[in-house]
Amino acid sequence: MVQRDRRNRLGLAFLITLLVVVVGRLVVLQGVDGAALQLAAENDRLRSYPIEAVRGQVTDRNGNPLAYSVNAVTVNADPSVVADPTRTALALTTLLGVPVDELTEKLSREGRFVVLAEKVSTEAADEIRELPLSTRGGLVLVDDPVRLYPAGAVGGQVVGFVGSDGDGLAGIEQTFDEELAGTDGQERIEVDGSGNPIPSGIDDSQPATDGSSVQLTLDEDLQYVVQQTLDAACADEATESASAVVQDVHTGEVVALASCPGYDPNTYNTTDPALLGNPVVSDVYEPGSVMKAVTLAAAIEEGKATKDTVLNVDGHIQAGDVVVTDAHDHEPIDFTLTGILAKSSNVGSIMLAREVGDSTFERYLRAFGLGSTTGVELPGESAGILQDSAEWSAARAANVPIGQGVSVTTLQMASVYQALANDGVRIPPRIVSSVTAPDGTVTDTPQPAGVRVVSESTADQLTYMLEAVVGPGGTAPLGEVDGFRVAGKTGTAQRANPETGSYAGGGYFTTFVGYAPADDPQYVVAVDLERPTSDAEGGQVAAPLFADVMRYALMSGGVVPSGSPRPDFTLTVP
């Protein structure tokens, strides 16, 4: 009896202890840990997916789109909650364009995440969302916009492209990547055990902020004409590459900028990587005689001569241990300064440079923007190559005034002539007009301040002399544009031969840079061609391309034909 009572007391004590433990645990769970456990359960049901911001547009000066994004999705899956991988694969194969066996394999994998297809159209995505729950269970559709470039290769080197991760990798897409990209958001929603959103569940999503749009100074129609003109030039057997720039004389805005061979940003990933740059701003060349405009401008500005000054010019001149000749050696000729430029006399240009002096001449070169970047809003811009004059040998001091021994970009040469056309004031080129934020706020790109390089009088004299280049007896009659007076200069520079490390057998860079109308300049056009196997001169091959581009620029810009006749020029005196 005693033992039975003892057992009962022990059993009762055990039950009371167990009850206390259970009640205590319930108190802890509901009173102390309840909120934390509830939060943990909610977090377990919450799923987070990125919301990609829509990248802003890139447009030309008239609002025509050169780059924009369209909605698309990436289709992911959680294989652990896919009820029947084969059935789901059969339903998706046509919509995703992925073979059934590949989809089945992915949907049957271990793990909780797999990518089924990227850049899926919104139409296909809508059809996926309409599939029965038993088939679409475990599928997750995430925003994944597609970047399109409707103009293709037209402006492609300027606009650039974005990589697979959405980052800008070239051109304006790279320079303005932060503005164009915007800020991604996040979708954070409560789902059921099959991974499907709970209609009345938690939605703690943060919306994305779309990117700003960038408007360029380019004119798409003119850009098309320039690209077609260059592509035709590159189609011959002699031209390896070619570049061109059209610049507004009074604002410095780049209205067209292209080169060949170019590339289509839509297919950048299948393009030779060597072609994915922008040679107009990154590649340098020796410009040849187009540099003589700077040489003569320096001489006039320094008071050493005027357009009518007469020099007795021999056919050759000694420069250290080398002899520099004109295109053809000749007996002494009494050239006016105008004649020296119109006939492109090397010897006459060197004589004038020596009057100016090396250090002073270098100062003018740098004032015209040579040896430094222009600051245009494009990546990879080169400053060119301009050695300090203190280091010039006698041969280099004779070569630089005629455009050898110094290297420039096509945009730099256009900028030099923009200054001459603009009464001696150089305005650094720009290619971005404005940036428009998602809320519609427009921020205009400020026009860079002009820098006076030479006086208006000097610029006027250079314009007169450059007109003579295209006039009777000049080197570039093929640069004429019917109805308009043209001022410009040819250039034919030896090209270094990479196989020999010398100029021998390297062919030539042929150039023409000019502006029109000469009596009221509106546009500058610079054209250069790399021709490794040709000895044709700039007046023969570059000047006609200049004329074609300038003609369209003037006509499309509504520029009125010149109202005054071209003056008569005196090139030599008896």
Image (cartoon, grey):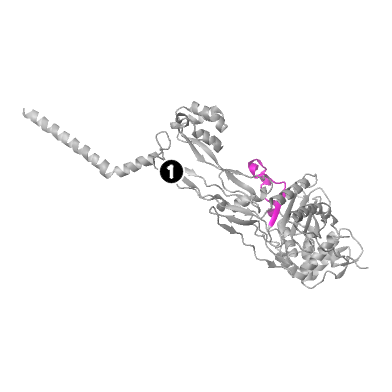
Residue at (63% x, 48% y) in the render = 65
Q: Residue at x 33, y 42 (%)?
A: 38
Q: Residue furthest right?
A: 574
The reply to whether the magenta stretch includes residue 324 is no
Quarter of the figure that contains the C terminus: bottom right
- The image quarter in which residue 422 lies: bottom right
Q: Which of 99/108 is in front?
A: 99
Residue type at tag 1: Arg
Residue 134 shows in the view = yes
Q: Position of residue 273 (x, y in %)?
A: 66, 44
Residue 133, image x and y in percent? 45, 31
Q: Mark 1 sits on what residue?
A: 188
Q: Is residue 270 above or below residue 547?
A: above
Is residue 119 in view?
A: no
- Provide residue 278's location: percent of width, then percent of height: 68, 51
Task: Give whichever of 497, 303 is nearer the camera.
Answer: 303
Which quadrant, please, contains the N terminus? top left
Q: Residues within 10 Å of mark 1 (few under 14, many from 20)?
A: some
Q: Is residue 239 above or below residue 253?
A: above
* Residue 428 % position (x, y): 67, 62
Q: Secondary structure at mark 1?
A: strand
- Judged from this view, the residue extending furthest toward the bottom is 303
Q: Residue at x 40, y 35 (%)?
A: 192
Specify the quadrant of the image occupied by residue 71: top right
Q: Nearer the viewer, residue 257 or 64?
A: 64
Asked if the stretch drawn in magenta spans residue 278, the answer is yes
* Relative horizontal placement of residue 102, taking residue 332 as reference (left or right): left
The region drawn magenta spans: 254-282
Left or right? Give the position of 211 relative to 530.
left
